[in-house]
Amino acid sequence: MDMGVAEGEEDPSMKSVSGTLLSTLLEPVAPSAFFSTYFEKKPLHLARSADPDYPHEPLLTRKDVEEMLLRQSLRYGVDLNVTNVVDGVRRTLDLLPSAGEDPVVAEAKDVMSNLESGCSVRLLCPQMHSDDVWELCSILETTFGCMVGANAYLTPTASQGFAPHYDDVDVFILQQEGKKRWRVYPPLKGEVLPRKSSRDFREDEIGKPVLDVVLGEGDLLYLPRGWIHQAVTTREDTHSLHLTVSCMQDWSWSAMLEEVLPEAIKRASGGAGAESEELRGGMPRDFLEYMGVMHDNDWAIKDVRKNGGTVEGEERTKVRKRTQFRKLLKSKLSLVLDSALRLADWGADEMGKSFLWDRLPPAYSEEEKADTSDGQPGAPIFPETMVRISRDGIARVVVEGDKAVVYHCGDNERKYHGNPLSPLDFELDDAPAIECLFKTVAPRWIAVKDLPHPPAEDFDDKVDIVKALFEEGIVAIRQVEGVKRR
């Protein structure tokens, strides 16, 4: 598969590379049409296997999976699952460890024996072991702006590994080998774009499919999160192997609000001004006498008024107090909302930090690697040295207290959260230079001496900043030949 460099394009930005890769995946649908018509809205089926001119090159093969089983010490429940569906019920056949022991390492012969017996093998996070899958996911993270992961599913002929269910991620199903029949059902009421995956469903709970297709080699099926699906291999092939590439896991406005609102309440109520004092004011002394579920008879009062009646006495007083309480609550919420809007950049930085920890380490090309500390270990940095971030979006600078702090994914492992984040602290007056450097992306470069560092444009400070980031592996450099070094 073309991993994203357009023909004739030299030194492309990662946005360009990622866009070209997505275009290849979605061919013949343009990415713009995909995002406007299908993304988070409805499934997309691309049948290309019957086209002799479509160049299908599998990213993963059955032989690759067998090699992983032989060489990688894959563990049940951590790196793979063995499953099948009997009478509509999913069974997981993983070998479980004894109490207190580590997960059981799968023997290749046992796994393949289960496969021949009709079981499906789900390989979790094949990007840990396959460079091609790692590169695919790493590049697509630029397009989607969130973590991109993958699973691989190897299933024998005429078998089903999983019962009907929906996922909490958007998935691109890429058929690698063989064929598989997919049946897709619309989301249930209230379960559009869910934040959690579903339980397994019975056939009588999900109705009739709105899509019933067979994927052949090179075909693609996109499913937004929440769309129920099930799949079974056909009898035409010895096995089916497909790759699911996933994104958008809990990457929503709900997640953003969960970051911002608690901090907004804290800041709005923690100041010295009148608004903060208002939020810290005590609750009405008697509010528990008219608020709460046991006092909620609004529906009954509406019925009385609908039928021409009136509410008098104690009930009338309670209605008035409940109305006033809601008005007071609304006014307090408006103060918190003002605080939340001022925290928009802070919230974005918090989500950005989460993404940098969640995402894969950059899968550098050989050309990219040649300009980093991997390709030039110990290279000197001069004021005339040309510099840029080694890949768009792999680092960001935030302000924490009296420091400018750089977060990045350069030290991440392919294993999810395999390493903790390792932020770098800088002085606040270093921030303009770092911001400029992180905004300088391929194909552009900037000389170290031209990085802004007010008020004192000190070359030594600029060199030290670049040197620290270069040694961390997140900055690319090129020396200018024939320039006298300072």
Image: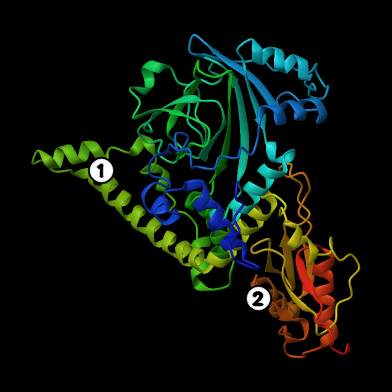
Q: What residue is shown with label 2?
A: 444
Q: Nearer the viewer, residue 389 or 421?
A: 389
Name the residue: 56% across, 62% down: 16
Q: List x then y, in percent, for residue 376.
A: 86, 66
Q: CA distance from mark 1 to mark 2?
A: 74 Å
Picture quadrant where residue 151 is located: top right
Mark 2 neighbour density, 10 Å: few (under 14) some (14–19) many (20 or more): some
For badge 2, the amino acid type reads Arg
- Whether 222 is drawn above or below 267: the answer is above
Q: Nearer the viewer, residue 81 or 340?
A: 81
* Any part of residue 161 in sight: yes
Name the residue: 84% across, 62% down: 375
Q: Which mark is residue 314?
A: 1
Q: Earlier in the sequence, mark 1 or mark 2?
A: 1
Name the residue: 76% across, 68% down: 475
Q: List x then y, in percent, for residue 440.
A: 66, 74
- Whether 479 is drawn above or below 29: the answer is below
| Residue at the limit of the structure toward the left, as seen here | 308
- Secondary structure state at the residue bearing disc 1: helix
The coloring applied to the image is rainbow
For badge 1, the amino acid type reads Glu
